[in-house]
Amino acid sequence: MADSKELLTKLSDASTESEFFSPIPTGYKKGKTKYVFVMGTVMSGLGKGIFSSCLAKLLQDKGLKVAPIKLEGYLNIDSGTLNPFRHGEVFVLDDGMETDMDLGTYERMLDLDLSKANFATSGQIFSSVLNKERHGDYLGRDVQMIPHVTGEVKLKLRQLAADSKADVVFVEIGGTVGDLENAYYLEAMRELAYEEGPHSSCFVALTYILEPPALGEQKSKAAQLGIKQVMQLGIQPDIIACRATNPVNEKARQKISIYSNVPFERVVSLHDSASIYMIPSMLREHGLDFEVLRLLKIEDRINLRHERKAWARWCDFTDRIGTARYKSTIGITGKYTSVRDSYASIINALEHAGIALGCDVGIEWIETTDITDKNAAERLASVDGIIVPGGFGSRGAEGKIACVRYARESDLPYLGLCLGFQMAVIDFARNVCKLKGAGSTELDPKCAEPVIDILPEQKKIEGLGGNMRLGGRDVEIKPETVAWNLFGGKDSVRMRFRHRYEVDPKYIETLEAGGLVFSGKAPDQPIMQILELPDHPFFMGTQAHPCLTSRPLRPSPMFVGLVAAATKRRHAQVDLPDCIEAVKQVAGLA
């Protein structure tokens, strides 16, 4: 066996004489970065992203630098065109990359702003390989799944390791080990572990323990067969996490341990939890963090003082879960309400705000297709505040406008996100400024007063043509407004966007004359990005998606403001702080 330096040279060789091919990026140091691979068996949707992010958090708390990456098997280049009914919400990163919802889980749990380097699809991998083939980068070799496609996957992981200088890269493979589209990912992981050498990698298999009501006992056979598939691929799991509704009993864990060659103490129960934010504690109690450190031989890299401080902060947060003194109900008026994952970031942002305020926030899902001005009061009677979230298309749009109007006229706390911002502008234009034909060219290309439109001058400003504004943008905040107070008196904040349509600047003067305040705009551009009504308990809209940047320990000020106003409305007899004071208390500014 060649020494490591010679092997790396061979692995990088693209000649026709060697079968070793595994590109090594500039600056990559073998042994510096370790890898944790998280795979799913039995079924998808087990919470691989939640498990991986929670385990990564425990290592991050110990002072280690972690970098997550999600590998998806579908051929789409990104998640931007995926229907929320099929794949949950599209999560937008600061650099504009459209990803699946697991990247949101990583950002929230690790309090990191990720980038396109943290997300890959088969479409990206194959496109890169084919582009290199066209440019002659393979020196006449016949391009194959092995070693070239698997080599591209390994290059992606090593590039992330080199650029992030991470101690540990967490690799989550979407779907299950039985999916055809995941076969080359799993082969790449096997190859990478072989090439990096002993103690370089840790394989974690998530499985599912069945508990049929008719039988009244837990069954592990499906889990055993799923793990057998992993082992048939040449991968020996180091840890097996057993998802289940109830705690997995010792008998089932023993069976899986015997069947998989995994020590019993590393076959752990991951049963349902009241909150995903309690799962790091569950993993810590199982000792999985130190098991991973021992497997990777990096115990000497940890900082226990850092861990004590970080864990104390986290426990202060989780100790407040389930101890709410107040309640409020927020209505989410959307078109994908039958699939809760379509609004995962909104749900999390409401949870963050509720925990910070000591409020149990309930959610009422409201389909807007049949809501009108006549029945809006009846349909919204049971909620203390509403959110009109983002979305595309005309279905349910008039119902959303009716909801906005009712919230505005009845002092019901309101937060409009992206499309919800646009619906608020249309309502105000129609019903306050008396522009009866006000509308959006997205919903009606022939509307008489297109207050919401794609504008040629904005296309020139952005240089994006008909494409959406995607990713993080700076927003200039108008002093002495509600937004300015919510953001702690900052003149500029960074928010994330995903939209095409804007307020037509020629209507801004009319809208402002009617009393609408545009408190946030693009710097040096006539692009309105936050609106508010100053004499309303809480009425705000933004073209952005503030839920994407809400964090457990740093909840979004807009969501805190909404929940505070809704709670104050419900508990009118209790002396509660208004939305601005509540945000200041949460941020430690009061």
Image (spheres, rainbow, N blue to C red):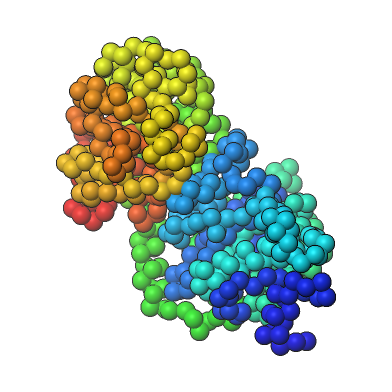
Where residue 341 sits, quadrant-wise, is top right
Nearer to us in this view, 584 or 325: 584
User: Is residue 71 found left or right of 410 in the rendered image?
Assistant: right
Which residue is at 59% across, 46% downward?
78
Residue for point 55% across, 62% down: 68
Residue 510 x, y percent position in the rendering: 24, 21
Q: Is residue 116 above or below residue 155?
A: above
Q: Nearer the viewer, residue 18 or 512?
A: 18
Can residue 206 be spotted in the picture?
A: no
Choose between 50 and 484: the one closer to the eye. 484
Q: Quadrant of residue 186?
A: bottom right
Residue farthest left in this picture: 480
Q: Residue 317: in sight, yes or no?
A: yes
Quadrant in which the N terminus appears: bottom right
Nearest the viewer among 307 and 540 is 540
Q: x%, y% of residue 562?
A: 31, 38
On screen, residue 585 above or below 364: below
The residue located at (35%, 64%) in the rendering is 313
Percent x, y of residue 463: 44, 41
| Residue 57 horizontal side relative to residue 539, left or right | right
